[in-house]
Amino acid sequence: MSLTKSLSLGAALGLATAIPAAAQDDTTQIAFIPQIAGIPYYVAMEEGAQRAAEELGVEYVQEGPTSTNAADQLRIFESFVNQGFDVIAISPLDEETLKPAIARALEAGIVVLTSDADAPGSDRQFFVAQALDQDLGYTLLDEAVERIGESGKIAIVSDSPTIQSMQNWIAAIEERAAEAYPEIEIVSVDHTDGTAQRAYQFATDAMTRNPDLKAVLGMASTTCPGIAQAVEAAGLVGEVLTAGYCSPNTAREYIKSGAMPFSVLWNPAELGYLTVWVGDHLVDGGEITEDFEVDGLEQTIQYLPENDVILLGPPAVFTEENVDDFDF
């Protein structure tokens, strides 16, 4: 993020100390707005965030839309601004919708972070990232190719096209295919309305159009059950592979049935913990200028100054061998 379109770290910290008057005498208040409420992934993120909040002595609130609706997400963001929260973190559904609201929040002295997904063209101060987009895209395709071979047709089912992180993952998959697996053909990229039912339909359509389809890749936790169920319903378990960015609890049933042999993700509880830690650190006047350690997390946290990205770590791959070791 360039200084011409964003706050410098010094300016950001200056704003961070200008806590809204309504909150000056109260505990630091940190809010997070997920892309959708209630799914296991974001429930786990909330659990990690609440653990950090208890240890740090801050108040944490998480509220998201009931569907992947950018207007509803904006309404929630503006509500937290009006309530005078000290920190608002968000996993953006639509960067353009949020840009003016993020700018207003910063003017009000609120620390604004993106977490889980980014809005790099906005004035957000830092992106608390789960893993690098390129690593996620490459890992998903590499793991799929290891199982289906280096040639064949693949379909992709994603959520809303306005979710930049998922667009980045798709671009990384396409880049990896072009560079490393030229005989892999991506035959379709479809976007759902955030429901497993729509993902089911897109996966079914892809298999119907392409009887020789080898894999369907899901870009969102909401797509994983739908694409796996479509393969099961078609009686093609073992013939058409499904995989995606899904929590172990979401994917477990399908990993064990063989419909989805693996899932790629990270630990969302740790991402929630790190998001709260970063917000509290900035409100307290702390700086982030290099890699750092966080009590409560085992790994070193990387700082990528060129984009103001705070990186949790590399992707994890969940398979039948390790899926039961995780509960999120």
Image (cartoon, helix red, strand yellow):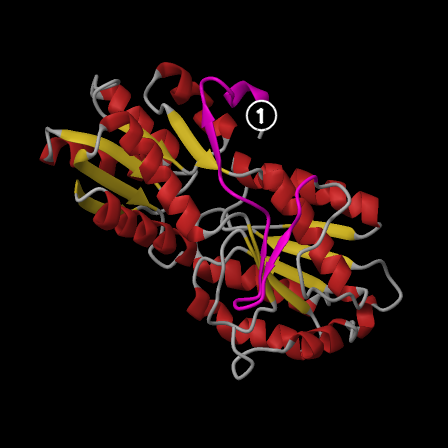
Residue annotated with mark 1: 326
Q: Residue at x 63, y 78 (%)?
A: 8
- Label 1 sits on what residue type? Phe
Q: Residue 135 appears at what percent x and percent y?
A: 43, 47
**Which quadrant of the structure image shows residue 199?**
top left
Which of these two is toward me, 66 or 9? 9
Q: Residue 58 appears at what percent x and percent y?
A: 81, 52
Q: Residue at x 64, y 75 (%)?
A: 106
- Residue lying furthest front: 180
Residue 201 drawn above or below residue 34: above
Left or right, 140 with reference to 109? left
For disc 1, the neighbor class at 10 Å (few under 14, some 14 to 19, many from 20) is few
- Quarter of the picture containing the C terminus is top right
| Residue 227 visible in the current orientation | no
Q: Residue at x 34, y 17 (%)?
A: 258
Left or right, 58 with reference to 162? right
Residue 266 drawn above or below residue 293: above
Which of these two is toward me, 268 or 26? 268
| Residue 233 visible in the current orientation | yes
Is residue 310 a member of the stretch shown in magenta?
A: yes
Q: Residue 173 appears at what percent x and percent y?
A: 30, 47
Residue 156 drawn above or below residue 232: below
The magenta-colored residue range is 298-326
- Residue lying furthest bottom: 4
Q: Residue at x 46, y 62 (%)?
A: 71
Q: Residue 307 appears at what percent x and percent y?
A: 52, 67
Is residue 16 a member of the stretch shown in magenta?
A: no
Element at label 1: loop
